[in-house]
Amino acid sequence: MPPINTEQMVITDVKHMPIVKAYAKKIGLVETIDRMVDTQMELSPGYAVLGMVLDTLSGRTPLYRLAEFFEEKDTELLLGAPIEPERFCDTNLGRSMDKVFETGTQKIFSQLAQNALTAFEVDPRRLHFDTTSVSVFGDYDLVDPPFDITYGYSKDKRPDLKQFLISMLCVDRNIPILGTTTDGNASDKTLNNELLTNISKHMARHGLEPGPMSMWPTRRLSPKTI
């Protein structure tokens, strides 16, 4: 057997990313997003999201230039398909995100959460709702923004910066089943009331009568319909 010429080899440390891909496969991330988002682009929105998830969990910031991120990497190992790195250009990713937004980010997230609850047999009977603030820098002159980036109560102790809020409804070991972004000056009290109102409407559609929180049934509620 001839010796291997290591000088012609490109060695890349993929770290924990194959494990992330395995979890994504178990919850059907790519297939679910591609089924819910109607598009015929050369890079499917499911693979676009998976690529961004891998990039984010690799510790690389900011979230752009994914084509460079996937260069000299085995995309079939990391994504489950031999996709050319150049398909992860900013144009394709931007179009994918537009399509995801049009479909409904919370709708997609909730379906993926339902997949995870089933795949990992998560106990959904105990709920926990909380918000966190995300501080940002720079100016944001947006047309018809989905939420306001503004000053508010800063949970990360940066009242000098504008922010937006992330709210999540979690089950079991703080596993999120519902999540959304909202105005930077929204109050937890208002968001809590909105969430409980939505849950009450969902219960009413299924013939359940909401009562005091301590008396609420522990029957599983499907997050994708809340």
Image (cartoon, grey):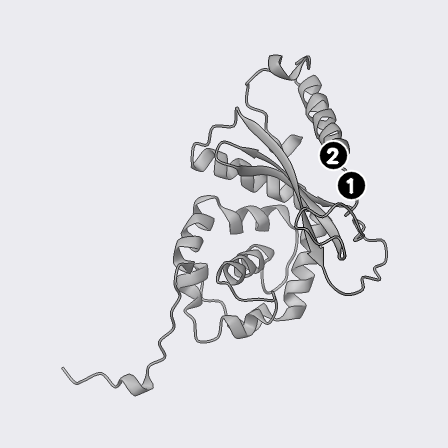
Q: Where 135 falls versus 222 (above or below)?
A: below
Badge 2 is on which residue?
191
Residue at 72% x, 23% y is 201
Seen in the image, is 11 located left or right of residue 133? left
Q: Which residue is nearer to you in this view: 162 or 140?
A: 162
- The spot of residue 117 in percent (x, y) is 49, 34
| Image mark for residue 186 | 1
- The quarter of the picture where the C terminus appears is top right
Dot 2: what SS?
Answer: helix
Q: Where 25 falls versus 175 (above or below)?
A: below
Kindly report the distance in space between the C-alpha atoms of the residues bearing marks 2 and 1: 7 Å
| Image mark for residue 153 | none
Q: Which residue is nearer to you in this view: 147 or 50?
A: 147
Residue kind at label 1, given as amino acid type: Ala
Residue kind at label 2, given as amino acid type: Leu
- The spot of residue 175 in percent (x, y) is 52, 38
Seen in the image, is 44 located left or right of residue 201? left
- The spot of residue 23 in percent (x, y) is 43, 48
- The quarter of the picture where the N terminus appears is bottom left
Residue at 43% x, 62% y is 78
Disc with the residue nearer the chain's start (2 vs 1): 1
